[in-house]
Image: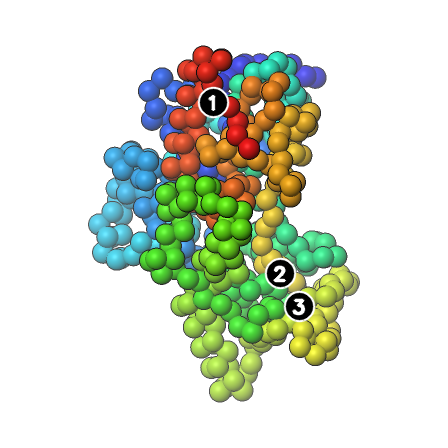
Amino acid sequence: MVHTTAEYDVIGVGFGPSNLALAVALTESAEAPSALFLERQASFGWHRGMLLDDATMQVSFLKDLVTLRNPSSRFSFLNYLHERGRLVDFINHKTLFPLRVEFHDYLEWAARQVDDLVRYGHEVIGVRRVADDLVEVLVDTGTGTIVHRARNLVLATGLQPSLPPGVVADERIWHSRDLLHRVAALGAEPPKRIVVVGAGQSAAEVTAFLHDRYADAEVWAVYSRFGYSPADDSSFANRIFDPSAVDDFYDAPGWVKDQLLTYHANTNYSVVDSELIAELYRRSYREQVLGRPRLRMMNVSRLVGAVSTPDGVRVTVEALATGEQTVLDADILVCATGYDPVEPATLLGELNAFCRRDAAGRLEVDRDYRVATDDGLGVGIYLQGGTEHSHGISSSLLSNGAVRAAEILDAIRTRADAPANARPVATR
């Protein structure tokens, strides 16, 4: 049964850190637009399957949900620490990078304070145009379908796991996103051989974690590089994540954007913290000395096949330099092979016809993160993610979440307050 409920100024689709930052900004705003956030998960959660006990954040705690927008906010990480009774202890820790489990607890703490704006277990399954400035959002609640109406949409649907070509996840073939859930579901018999594919931070963390957890198992790390590459977290390189860098990137010619993405890929993609690289090397060398090698590195190699068997998974690895193939009968294959952005078109339905795209088929996005649309659609469609091509490398990262939320909220207000004949026109 389908029935229509309320009408909102803003409906946020997805409720990860990005839309959480927007919900907090709305909560702290005077005369805020009416808003509702819809999340298909049963509760707040952010990469729960990779909340390893000793994994730390790779972004400063000062780039939390609010500090770069409002340093005095009660939603800051520092206030969270104060309420948890750990502020002094954290200061004595002398680090900018909290444990990932701690930062996740901070996000949950903040999410609980804006709980009135969120409906969990509500999956958006479609959007349809009602009028020039109004859309209906179709929502599956698990017990039926309801419809909300909105004048603005903010899409923060996150990323979807990417697996190597031809590889299908099952009980023995995992994506790193599900690591802890899958490990918990394993039977009493520990694995004897595990293959981990990938060259980035997640791959290295998974390799170290499994090598620790299963003391008698071989762990084979497969990656196409000669070795793990260290992340460039130097001060000048990190300026690519500054709020002002978004302006520089957005206004740059296309060829400059391509160069910047190439130059600074090693700040975020397929790179590993230097300390973890050193730790894995120490383990590998120590095992060589002791004559008990369990940590095996297959560098300059790629996965070319993975087939589930009654006892595990048969993995075929090809050496890129020689073309030689090695077949490994493993108990588990973990693919730490990253994520792809979720294409907004899957949700927008008939609204796609109004959305402008560039020569490469990508959505054209204004500086305020609003999708450029043709006449006939006055509804604002804002993106939190999927804008790397227009806004740069930090488009879906925590680094600019607080500032991005403020810019989107300001844009929604400005357009709402402007007379219809004086509203900003979408630019190509």
Tell me the SS state at disc 2.
strand
In the rendered view, tell whether residue 2 sits above or below residue 362: above
Q: Residue at x 51, y 69 (%)?
A: 228
Residue 104 numbered mark, or none: none
Task: Examine the rendering and report whether any part of residue 80 can be seen.
Answer: no
Q: Earlier in the sequence, mark 2 or mark 1?
A: 2
- Tell me the amino acid under the disc marked 3: Arg
Q: Earlier in the sequence, mark 1 or mark 3?
A: 3
Q: In the shown orientation, is residue 3 left or right of residue 389?
A: right
Q: Earlier in the sequence, mark 3 or mark 2?
A: 3
Tell me the SS state at disc 1.
loop
Give the residue pinned by disc 2: 334
Q: Residue at x 64, y 71 (%)?
A: 301
Of the two numbered discs 3 and 2 in the rendering, the one whose residue sits closer to the viewer? 3
* C-alpha separation, residue under disc 2 versus residue under disc 1: 48 Å
In the rendered image, which quarter is residue 363 located in?
top right
Of the two numbered discs 2 and 1 in the rendering, the one whose residue sits closer to the viewer? 1
Give the residue pinned by disc 1: 424
Query: Please, which colouring scheme is shown?
Result: rainbow
Give the residue pinned by disc 3: 302
- Residue 306 is situated, as x and y percent measured from the top left of the image, at 73, 63
Residue 236 versus residue 77: which sits nearer the camera? 236
- Residue 46 is situated, as x and y percent measured from the top left of the image, at 49, 44
Q: Quadrant of the C terminus?
A: top right
Task: Examine the rendering and report whether any part of residue 321 can be seen.
Answer: yes
